[in-house]
Image: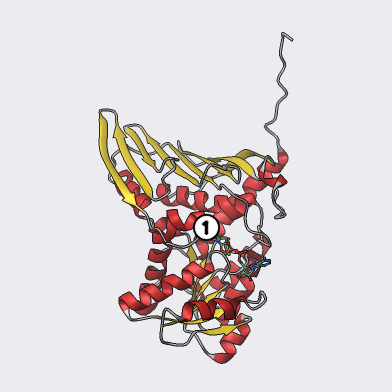
Amino acid sequence: MRIAVVGVGRIGVFHARHVQELAAERGDCVLAALVDGYGDLAARVAAELQDGQEAPIAAFEDVAALVAAGAADGAFIASRTEDHYRDARTLIDAGMRVLLEKPLTHSLATAREFAAYLDADDFRRTALMQAFMRRFDGPLLYAKEHIDRGAIGTPFKIVSILEDPVPPPAGYNSPGLLADMAVHNIDEIAWFSGQRPERVGGCGSLLYNQGITDVEEDFDDAFLQLYFPGALVGQIAVSRNHVAGYRNETWVYGPEGVVHVGAFSEDPLQVEVEVIGRGGLVARREFPLRDYGVAAPVFMGRFGLAYKAELAYYLDQCVAGAPFAVDHGAGLAALEVAVAGSGALRKKSEEIAVEFTRM
Ligand SMILES: NC(=O)c1ccc[n+]([C@@H]2O[C@H](COP(=O)([O-])OP(=O)(O)OC[C@H]3O[C@@H](n4cnc5c(N)ncnc54)[C@H](O)[C@@H]3O)[C@@H](O)[C@H]2O)c1
């Protein structure tokens, strides 16, 4: 398959490298084109990556030019979030199946319109894979295996934490803190539990990050509580204010124990998973992560292997003509929860004044 990477900013460059690595490892794909409308970014990155392969890498300013040139059979879209809908739809209209970065689109209205367009036709219905890389992450898959095997009983609380050490880069297009960051946690909880929340509540703040960045966001710190049917709650903490490093942690509580993935430490290249029951340790495993050997955004260290695994899965399903296990339905559901959550954060309905009796 000739693969195009659309958007070669912070993350798209690494997706392009992964295409090159998989091309060398499996021989059934090639990095054929890069698309980016920001200055000469596409041509510059193509020239850099050309050293890594013989087949030429074409550079295009937009997806329409890529389609007109007939230069790709599939694409990994990592363009600005406000461009996801336009880019994905143009490629799908041209007959390609695409792997699309999160979130599905930048607004609920466009996401619902896009989902209706995809659902309207047999080809389109299986044309989009949503890039929720956590579903392909070794440590999280290991944790899920233990949960599904009943190691802690039926979970009643899932806590998912994602905290960034630095603001997004200059020029970054954020649809809001929850749609940009918490969609990962929302999808993770939906994936672990197999359920969708009925209600959400929470609180959000603008704390430290807002003062050091030009990227405008509604909040830079938030807590979200998800209420599921039955006895499950989800608790999500997302923040741009964890200046000591990238923090990713998940705790799953059940009547027989707890599963813990990750812990903040100074070593960003190691993730621990622990399963602890009433009687003590059930399982513990260290997962080494990947050092790219070049300056890379923090999330590449933690999830680099997962990004590559999701891409390999996308290629497998395309080659086999099989549907994607994580599609626009998952992307839309996560965005719907995030948007409802943002509404809850804006309402501040839970704030109650404290009345002290002593000065
Ligand atoms: N799955 C994940 O963990 C993850 C992580 C990061 C980003 N993403 C998603 O990937 C997509 C791209 O994110 P990114 O972090 O690569 O964004 P980015 O801002 O680095 O790059 C996106 C695009 O912005 C343009 N651009 C680059 N520099 C610019 C500047 N200085 N001013 C204006 N525009 C500029 C380029 O066209 C580039 O393709 C987003 O949809 C984001 O949500 C996902």
Residue identified by numbered label 1: 297
Q: Residue furthest bottom?
A: 69
Q: Is residue 219 visible?
A: no
- Quadrant into which the C terminus falls: top right
Residue situated in front as seen by the camera: 334 or 281 = 281
Say which element carries label 1: loop
**177 lies above or below 74:** above
Q: Position of residue 202 (x, y in %)?
A: 62, 38
10 Å crowding of disc 1: few (<14), some (14-19), many (20+): some
Question: Residue 357: image x %, image y %?
Answer: 72, 9
Q: Amino acid at mark 1?
A: Pro
The answer to whether 31 appears left or right of 86 in the picture is left
Residue 216 appears anywhere in the view: yes
Q: Is residue 81 left or right of residue 295?
A: right
Ligand 1 has an atom within 8 Å of the beta carbon of the residue at disc 1: yes
* Residue at the image point whose x is 64% and y is 74% from the top: 86
Horizontal and vertical percent position of residue 78: 55, 68
Residue appearing at x 54%, y 56% in the figure: 333
Q: Give the residue displayed 43% in from the left and 87% down from the top.
A: 55
Question: On the picture, is 348 further left or further right than 17?
Answer: right
Residue 324 image position (x, y, % from top left)? 42, 68
| Colour scheme in use | secondary structure
